[in-house]
Image: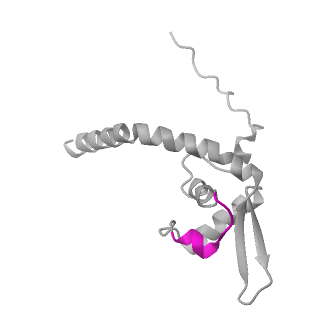
Amino acid sequence: MIEPLDPDMFDPMCPSSAIPFQIGDKWTGMIVRCLADGPRRFTELRVPLRTITPKVLTATLRAMQRDGLVTRTAYDENPPRVEYELTELGRSMLILIDAARTWSEQYLPAILAARRASEELTTFR
């Protein structure tokens, strides 16, 4: 028989809330991939991330900057130019993102099949 779960298994002082992204965070991983080859401007990021709103992209970049994942460099030019670049800490996330992409490529068909089966069950009830 399996032991019951410990009600205190998640320590309130656990630093998990400080982790800069959640598994499944929609945009952080994509932004990291966009910045993998070097600095990019906001408008460049919007091209592959065309479904993100400017407000959400700005908020995500600010959160990533706050957490030390990207740097924001503003150039005193006319018109003004701002670039975002991965820090070494941000670059270290590429290993995790690549692993998640590999896992997803392997198991996405099974996940989609399970979703279809679940939808069929709920449709016929």
Up/down of 31 relative to 101, above or below: below
Up/down of 79 relative to 16, above or below: below
Does the magenta run of residues contain 8?
no
Q: Quadrant of the C terminus?
A: top left
Q: Quadrant of residue 43?
A: bottom right
Count the labels in the image.
0
Q: Give me the residue at 64% from left, 23% from top.
A: 6
Q: Please identify the residue farthest to the front as the structure is shown.
A: 37
Residue closest to the eye, 38 or 100: 38
Up/down of 88 relative to 59, above or below: above
Q: Give me the residue at 32% from left, 38% from top.
A: 114
Q: Quadrant of residue 73?
A: bottom right
Q: Is residue 17 left or right of residue 47?
A: right
Q: Please identify the residue farthest to the left as the structure is shown.
A: 124
**Residue 110 image point, x, y percent:** 35, 37
Q: Please identify the residue farthest to the right as the structure is shown.
A: 76
Q: Quadrant of residue 84?
A: bottom right
Residue closest to the eye, 50 or 76: 76
Does the magenta run of residues contain 45?
yes
Task: Indicate how the structure is coloured in the image.
Answer: one colour
Q: Give me the residue at 22% from left, 46% from top.
A: 123
Q: Give me the residue at 50% from left, 9% from top.
A: 1
**Residue 92 image point, x, y percent:** 70, 46
**Residue 105 image point, x, y percent:** 43, 42
Up/down of 45 relative to 88, above or below: below
Q: Please identify the residue farthest to the bottom as the structure is shown.
A: 78
Q: Is residue 53 left or right of residue 77?
A: left
Q: Is residue 125 left or right of residue 35?
A: left
User: In the rendered structure, which segment of residues is drawn in magenta?
Assistant: 37-47
**Residue 124 image point, x, y percent:** 19, 43
